[in-house]
Image (tube, helix red, strand yellow):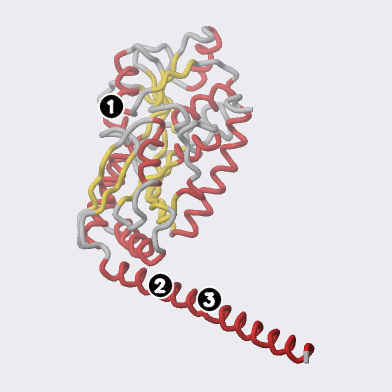
């Protein structure tokens, strides 16, 4: 009798456990289904109001110029305006952190850039990990830097600038829109490769940094072409070289730094659109499609060309991979420059 009772109890327990497991799995499947339906419904109705695109630099910067050109065309595809909002500071990380904390509904986006990767590899306290804290929507553009100097500086070439910096170590200053930005790292890379010591002076934005070089309180800057082309044409700044390996179309007779004496020198600024990490893939894909359409438009192509900006289109997965490769590349460079241990 005891044996039979035990078997009966065991059988009942097994049946109860199996039933509970089945119900748990069923409930889980229902929850996933409801989540997918909600996500799909959200994507179908998205967007039903304006979208904010946050940038981490000031008005007139290459980020601002790029964002406004692309936002206007994306708005046409999405049927709702994409409004650019500047939240400058901390090398773009104030804006980045605001998007990380935003509702993941696709209505708050971020114009990420190489500056955010640099801040992360340099271990800045406000830095975000773009690969984990944000979701990649797509790459947008690449903006080459131009090495410029105050017109009164006794240097009309890269070689003359190097000679002057070696003759007066620590006396030449170079400006940037903030620590950890590409203009900053361009200057540091120049110091390493040329064997000189120009002193870094950070600002909150590119226009302010360029203005003090124009005024003469600073002498040198690696500036985004979109910011300084008109200043060069107006002879307010003197261009010495492109910071990339290929000459830009806007100034075809201007050599690259690599050509002018530092072989292999190559830095540029790239921008991409990111969303909060938990943004539904369906919403992300809708944004990515609008971005692709915008970058293929004649309006964007014309505006980019005028500003010396090159379209740099890539979808979500390609952009995510690119962020990883950039982090690896710049990690090695900042260590070599002595900016981190």
Visible residue check, residue 82: yes
Residue at the spot 36% in from the left edge and 46% down from the top edge: 99
Q: Residue at x 25, y 45 (%)?
A: 84
Name which residue lies at 54% across and 9% down: 169
SS at circle 2? helix
Of helix, strand and loop, which one carries label 3? helix
Label at residue 231: 1
Q: Nearer the viewer, mark 2 or mark 3?
A: 3
Classify 10 Å Cα crowding around label 2: few (below 14), some (14-19), many (20 and above): some
Quarter occupied by the C terminus: top right
Separation of marks 3 and 1 at Cα, in angstroms: 67 Å
Q: Nearer the viewer, mark 3 or mark 1?
A: 3
Q: Which mark is residue 36?
A: 2
Of callouts 2 and 3, the N-terminal one: 3
Quick one: label 3, few (<14), some, or many (20+) residues within 10 Å? few
Q: Is residue 83 left or right of residue 216?
A: left
């Amino acid at each position: 009798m005891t044996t039979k009772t035990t078997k009966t109890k065991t059988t009942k327990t097994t049946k109860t456990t199996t039933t509970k497991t089945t119900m748990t799995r069923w409930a889980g499947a229902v929850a996933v289904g409801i989540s997918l339906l909600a996500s799909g419904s959200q994507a179908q109705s998205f967007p039903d109001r304006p979208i904010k695109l946050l940038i981490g630099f000031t008005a007139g910067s290459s980020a601002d110029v790029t964002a406004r050109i692309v936002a206007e065309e994306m708005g046409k595809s999405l049927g709702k305006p994409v409004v650019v909002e500047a939240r400058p500071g901390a090398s773009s990380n104030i804006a980045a952190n605001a998007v990380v904390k935003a509702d993941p509904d696709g209505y708050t986006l971020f114009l990420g850039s190489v500056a955010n990767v640099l801040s992360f590899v340099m271990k800045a306290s406000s830095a975000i990990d773009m690969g984990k804290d944000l979701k990649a929507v797509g790459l947008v553009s690449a903006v080459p830097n131009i090495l410029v100097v105050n017109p009164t500086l006794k240097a009309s070439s890269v070689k003359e600038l190097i000679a002057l910096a070696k003759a007066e170590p620590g006396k030449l200053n170079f400006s940037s829109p903030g620590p950890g930005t590409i203009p900053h790292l361009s200057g540091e890379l120049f110091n390493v490769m040329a064997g000189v010591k120009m002193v870094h002076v950070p600002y909150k934005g590119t226009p302010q940094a360029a203005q003090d070089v124009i005024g003469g309180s600073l002498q040198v800057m690696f500036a985004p072409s979109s910011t300084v082309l008109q200043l060069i044409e107006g002879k307010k700044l003197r261009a010495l070289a492109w910071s990339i390996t290929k000459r830009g179309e806007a100034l075809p007779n201007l050599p690259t730094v690599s050509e002018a004496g530092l072989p292999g020198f190559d830095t540029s600024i790239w921008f991409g659109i990111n969303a909060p990490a938990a943004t539904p893939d369906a919403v992300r894909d809708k944004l990515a499609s609008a971005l692709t359409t915008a970058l293929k438009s004649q309006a964007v192509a014309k505006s980019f060309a005028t500003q010396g900006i090159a379209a740099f289109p890539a979808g979500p997965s390609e952009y995510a991979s690119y962020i990883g490769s950039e982090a690896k590349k710049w990690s090695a460079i900042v260590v070599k420059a002595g900016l981190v241990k």
